Amino acid sequence: MPPAGATSVKTAAPLDEAGLIRAAQQGDEDAFERLVRAYDQSVLRLAMNLLRSPEDARDVYQEALLRVFKNLHLFRFDCSFHTWLYRIVTNICLDHLRKRKVRREENSIVETAEGPLDRMDSVRTHAPYTDPERHTLNNQLTARIRVALDDLTPRERMVFELRHYQGLRLKNIGEVLGTSEEAAKNCLFRATQKMRVVLGEFV
Amino acid sequence: MSCAAIIPDLALYLYGELSAESEERLEQHCSECPECAAELQRYRHMLQACDAAAVPEPPQLLAECRHELARAVESSRDVVPPEPSNWFTRELRSLLSHSVGFRVPVGALALVAIGFFGARLAPQFGSGSPVQAGLLNVRSVQADASGRVQIAVDHTRRQTVSGSIDDPEVRKLLIEALHDESNAGVRVESVDMLKDHAALADVRNALVDRLQNDPNPGVRLKAIEGLKTFGGDPQVRQTLARVLENDANPGVRIQAIDLLTAHRDQSLVGVLQSVMRKEDNQYVRLKVRGALEDMRASVGTF
Ligand SMILES: [Zn+2]
């Protein structure tokens, strides 16, 4: 097994990947399993950190890797397997993020006796309810960062996730998301700038 | 080189995503401009803090996902093989090698596999048994040194109960569903159905309990909605005061303060003063202050 997390992507397992892919394409499930195990922890980590829900992360994992299993015969070696896999995974995650965004916007107005109030305005100054020590500085910073991340558009959030947490280079992120390196760079710039604004004096 | 032209590059610089010239230009500028150097430090601090904000996957999740995938791959085949594949067999063996607590819904193919390993169990899963895929849950699987296998199985048959909410049996089931920790969706549905029946004591108690204890703010908001007409009830008021002090969700606290202050009594003063000391939601603060002033109590020292 390669080391977990961001580094596993770059140092992908010392296995004959092309050979495994061909074998898996022929229906060799052992080969498929070995192929999956080189990357699946990164996939799960990506989904978990983006969606912050074990149930959703599990759904993404399942949907993505089953899709890989069913479509592997279509893989033509015109990009790396990792890029191909991440195209599938990021598409599914982006769908989740978009649905969530819509839901949150629909739910963000609370009716109060004084008229409607944007719930997100007040949430913004709050740590998540799971945090038992929401008054300590570090926890507040962590909570703010999560809120700042939630404020990004799904695409900005994804670029930030891939660059910061998964350690992909912008050029590769462009390939995964079907865009140019320059567009990915702009996206990363917007993401970090927005976060900087939300965090204000906190950093 | 102006500061305005440097700022957009700060984060990209920290990620090593600038061209060599831009990088050099930025370093040059920051060595001469303390403001930009300080801003670079803030970006660095922010990005470092992002690591602490990462949400790691629960320890068992990867193993569970792999197991589920193996099963899904298995059942996606067109032709059912006479014996489980190597992968599935190995998965099951690894599952058997240590006790696991997670639930594994078992389909027809899994039954084949269990029969394969736990021949002793075969009579229980005989061909005549009314087992259907998805209605059987393996709770735990253990193997001892001699190779004997113990599988704890919940064998449940799906039942449908229908009736009016006035039926105590139906209510009992709905209230039970309110406690299904694993399924927030079911809890939200149940509380939604129950919330218009808070006049019934069992429902009211369940709503009070969920308002205080449910981890999901959606459930807590619906519970409080159901208690709307009971703002004068002492038990409900006590709960509302606790929620106002402790609930981390401002939406829930807003509902709690509205409901609490709709009925004023002096016992509220202490609670409100204490809330005033730590509340940072503007709306809640406003309401608390108003209520305290109406009751001619001091707003408190803070
Ligand atoms: Zn400057």
Image (cartoon, coloured by chain):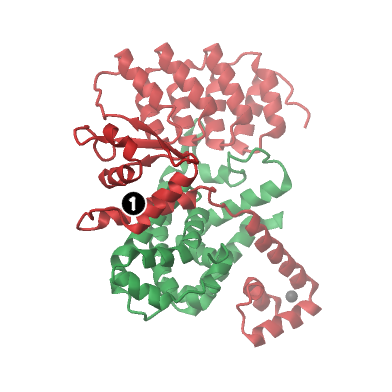
- Mark 1 lies within 8 Å of ligand 1 (Cβ measured): no
Quadrant in which residue B74 is drawn: bottom left
Amino acid residing under circle 1: Arg
Vertical order, A63 against B96 (above or below): below
**Image coords of residue B140 (percent x, y):** 44, 37
Q: Secondary structure at mark 1?
A: helix
- Front residue of B114 and B190: B114
Residue A102 appears in the figure: no
Question: Residue at left 56%, top 31%?
Answer: B253
User: Left or right: A27 with respect to B45?
Assistant: left
Question: Residue at left 74%, top 72%?
Answer: B36
Question: Residue at left 42%, top 54%?
Answer: B66
**Image coords of residue A53 (percent x, y):** 48, 47
- Front residue of A151 and B168: B168
Which chain identifier belongs to the green chain? A
Vertical order, B258 against A39 (above or below): above
- Front residue of B266 and B182: B182
**On-image quarter of the C terminus of chain A:** bottom right
User: Left or right: A90 with respect to A191?
Assistant: left
Chain letter belonging to callout 1:
B
To which residue does mark 1 refer? B71
